[in-house]
Structures are given as C-alpha cells and as structure tokens.
Amino acid sequence: MPCLSARIRTKTEWDALTPDEIDLFNRKVVCRTYPAGQVIFVQGDPCKGLYFIEDGLIAARKVDEEGQSAIVRLAYQGDTLGYRPLLAKENHRATAEVIKDAKICFIGAPTMHRLLRSNPRLGMLFLEHIAQALGEAEERLFQVAALSVRTRIIHLVVLLRDHYGTTTSDGTLFVELPMTRRDLAEMIGARPESVSRALRDIQDDGLMDLSGRTVRVDQIDRLIDELHHGLHI
C-alpha cells in the first residue's frame, strides 16, 4: 500500500496530519507510471485533484490564444501539481507533460477538500506553498525583463545541476539537460536563435561546453562568478 510519508516534503507537513488522516490518504491515493511524452492533464481541464511526483520530470506548459506554447515550470521528485486550481476551484492553467519517465500519485479533490476542512494547519501549509510559488513566478518575470540571455542560460544550468549534475574527481561538472534547446529557450523566455548565439559566446569564453544535451563545466567557480555578476547588473 502507498505510504504518505513518501509524498511529504518535511516533518512539519507529516506532523500536521492525524493518524486517521494519514490512513484516509493512503486508502484513497492511486499511483501509476507515465512514459516520457505523455500528458497528465491539459490546460483548461477541470482540476480533479492533486498529483504528487514520486520520480521523473514534468513540464508545465502554457499555450496562448495564438497557439504559441512556453514552459513555465519544471516539477521534480517531491513536487506537487494542481494545488492552486484545487484551492481556487479553477481549471488547470497549464498542461502537464512528462519530460522524463515518471511515477506520479494522485488523490482526488473530494478527499483533499475533506482533509483541508478538517485540518486548518494543513491548509496553512498549502498557503505557504502558494506564497513560495508566487515568489518564484516573480523571480522568473524579473529574469526575463532584466537579465541577459547569457545570464539566464547560466542560471538555468546552475539550477539544473542539483537534479541532473554529476561532478568527477577532478571537479569537472557534467549536467544532462532534460530538455531540447527549443524547450530551454521557452523556459528562459528567449528566442531559439538568441539562445544559440549566447551558447556560442559562453563556449567561446571557456565557461562551459555543450555537446548534444550534455553540458560540461571545467571550472564551476568561474560559472558561479559570472552568474553573480549578471544578477547584480
């Protein structure tokens, strides 16, 4: 039987639930695997509940009225999808697409509403998640408006190293990008040709080397220094 502890990020969240609530969750949760390329829910669909990512990578993609799409968020192991439309009683505002094979657990909206009504502390934790998400959204808007494409690329690589990076004994960092160059451009709010030019400049300066989807960084300190300089311009 699935165990709620695998879907709780912190001890604080675990302690917020009573034994009866944990038992209810474990009886109602359903887990399944999704291959890369599969869509979990579509922008505009009714929100039927929450999705807890056990493993894999999910991209939240928004489409405008002209059919242009952009990745607005990457969700990793331990992240939750659907909590904002669930609380607001709205439809999904983005499409969730599997980028890397994933295991995802789902719990229906009626069960979550029951838990939230009976446990105000759990509701406060959800509000904290929303506040954090708003802060992250504001940071992304700042990056698109104020930072160069070069700095945005370096920032994304530094963020991805925690999930997809490995460091060899000599200090060389390798990061396997979980997205295409087009997706990378969407993620940082830049045109693909601008990303290609910036990548060439970064490689010419010896900061990192990109082969296929593999980024190699020989001197991570130089990359971090460049990022700090770009963020403070």
Image (cartoon, rainbow, N blue to C red):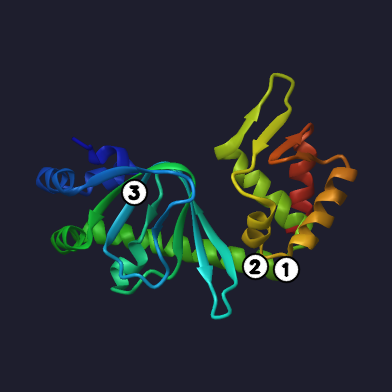
Residue hosting label 1:
146
Which residue is most to the left? 20
Of the residues under marks 1 and 3, which one precedes in the sequence? 3
Neighbour class for label 1 at 10 Å: few (<14), some, many (≥20)?
A: some
Amino acid at the residue labelled 1: Ala
Q: Is residue 78 left or right of residue 26?
A: right
Can you say whether 124 is above or below 80 in the image? below
Amino acid at the residue labelled 3: Phe
Q: Residue at x 89, y 44 (%)?
A: 205
Secondary structure of the residue carrying tag 2 is helix
Of the residues under marks 3 and 2, which one precedes in the sequence? 3
Q: Quadrant of the C terminus?
A: bottom right
Amino acid at the residue labelled 2: Phe
Position in image of residue 143 (x %, y %): 67, 64
- Residue 52's label in the rendered image is 3
Which residue is most to the bottom? 65
Position in image of residue 122 (x %, y %): 24, 56
| Marks 3 & 2, CB-CB < 8 Å contact | no
Secondary structure of the residue carrying tag 3 is strand
- Residue 39's label in the rendered image is none
Neighbour class for label 2 at 10 Å: few (<14), some, many (≥20)?
A: few
Position in image of residue 222 (x %, y %): 80, 40
Of 22 and 125, nearer the camera is 22
Q: Residue at x 9, y 46 (%)?
A: 20
Q: Is residue 87 left or right of residue 194?
A: left
Residue hosting label 2:
142
Neighbour class for label 3 at 10 Å: few (<14), some, many (≥20)?
A: many
- Label 2, label 1: how far apart the Cα atoms are: 6 Å
Where on the picture, by quarter, is residue 64? bottom right
